[in-house]
Amino acid sequence: MDSLQLAGIIVCVFAFGGMGVLFLNLTRGSAVGRQSAAELRGLMGSSASAGLAARSRRIATDDDDDDDQLVDIDTIKKRSGSSVAKKQEPDVNAKLFQAGIYSSEEKRKFQLARIICPGAAALICGFSSLTIFGSAVHTSMGILAGAFVGFALPLSWLERKIRSR
């Protein structure tokens, strides 16, 4: 197997994963992948942490030699908790507002561009790589590169519009 074919296969695997994320992002909106801190704490569960805390206390009483190395789970939670709130990335609607796009017609045009640009860029880059190189591997890599560029194009345009205001 040629190294170029292997690179093409790896790029294809990552591209299909990226296209899946793109499809999920377009169908569900920008709320995909965001979880609040309460939901994350709910995943840990209070019963699991209580069991660990009890276990650490039991080990501490059984083994008095290592008392300074064992720390209670509640103490670890207090130490690792940050009082400073992290800055959250604004969603697409907030970015549209910052860019000065207020009407529903302009928002609809932007969302349409987010859907059309990856396909159009993939077709353009795929066709140009087919005509320049003529191989299927280069064509598939051109299609994937075009899809990635097309996915980033509307958001980069929006960022430039925000900076120009």
Image (tube, rainbow, N blue to C red):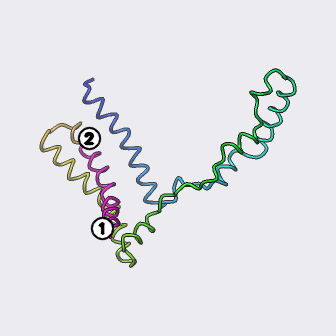
Foreground pick, 54 / 136: 54
**92 with respect to 58 (left or right):** left
Give x and y (percent) for residue 13.
37, 38
Alpha carbon distance from label 2 to label 1: 34 Å
Residue 141 marker: 2
- Which of marks 1 and 2 precedes in the sequence? 2
Residue 164 marker: 1
Q: What residue type is labelled 2?
A: Met
Q: Spot the residue most to the top.
A: 65
Q: Tell me what residue is drawn at x 29 percent, y 59 percent.
A: 117
Foreground pick, 141 / 99: 99
**Residue 94 drawn above or below residue 139:** below
**101 with respect to 4 (left or right):** right
Q: Tell me what residue is drawn at x 41 percent, y 44 percent.
A: 17
Q: Tell me what residue is drawn at x 67 percent, y 54 percent.
A: 38
Q: Tell me where the magenta segment starts and ends, as one range.
A: 142-165
Q: Which amino acid does label 1 sit on?
A: Ser
Q: Tell me what residue is drawn at x 60 percent, y 54 percent.
A: 84
Q: In which quarter of the image is residue 5?
A: top left
Give yes or no for residue 56 being in the magenta stretch. no
Give yes or no for residue 150 being in the magenta stretch. yes
Q: Spot the residue most to the right.
A: 61
Report the magenta stretch's main SS: helix
Q: How crowded is mark 1: few (under 14 residues within 10 Å), some or many (20 or more)?
A: few
Image quarter of the C terminus: bottom left
